[in-house]
Amino acid sequence: MKRIQPNGRPIEILLVEDSAGDVRLTQESLRESKVRNNLNVVPDGIEAMAYLRGQNGYADALRPDLILLDLNLPKKDGREVLLEIKADPDLKRIPVVILTTSRAEEDILRTYNLHANCYITKPVNLDQFIKVVRAIEDFWLTIVKLPPE
């Protein structure tokens, strides 16, 4: 049986990811989650900001409880998206987990300086990728108390 939030609604997750394969793996991993969730996916940084601000067809989008953000995105990269989220008084409390292929120390340092809540390097191995997504789910959706809207 899947757990739900005290208010009875599922956890809202926004995945900002341009790799169809990584999107599919994340969807499959979270589908079997212990916590009821809605995973919404946008493929680039411009769409992410439109989603978060309820613009361009996203007027009915629910505010995410958690954002999974890739850094290397088309149109507007994840670093810019993170900067905009954390500079916006209405969005800055949403936890942002960086989920990226970059292992560069400057990316890790910069994203933490921009107030990312967590930095995870995507494994290339399929089984390890699924384990990472499940670990994110276990920690962020089961252990951590997420802020209210």
Image (cartoon, rainbow, N blue to C red):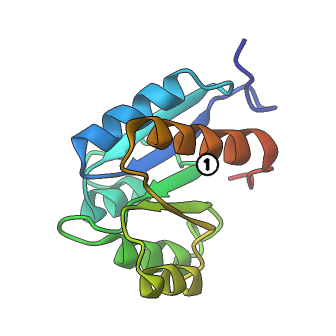
Q: Give 3 or 54, whichever is nearer the viewer.
A: 3
Question: Is residue 102 positioned above or below 97 on the image?
Answer: below
- Residue at position x 78%, y 50% from top? 144
- Residue at position x 81%, y 32% from top? 6
Q: Quadrant of residue 119?
A: bottom right
Q: Give 120 or 146, whichever is nearer the viewer.
A: 120
- In the image, taking residue 85 as reference, residue 71 lies left or right, namely left
Q: Residue furthest top?
A: 1
* Residue type (three-letter) at the residue carrying disc 1: Asp
- Residue at position x 42%, y 73% from top? 103
- Residue at position x 43%, y 42% from top? 61
Question: Is residue 68 positioned above or below 85 on the image?
Answer: above
Q: Position of residue 8 (x, y in %)?
A: 73, 25
Q: Position of residue 57 (x, y in %)?
A: 26, 45
Q: Secondary structure at mark 1?
A: loop
Question: Is residue 44 positioned above or below 34 on the image?
Answer: below
- In the image, taking residue 145 as reference, residue 41 lies left or right, namely left
Determine which residue is flagged by label 1.
65
Q: Position of residue 107 (x, y in %)?
A: 43, 81
- In the image, taking residue 31 as reference, residue 4 lies left or right, namely right
- In the image, taking residue 61 as reference, residue 19 lies left or right, namely left
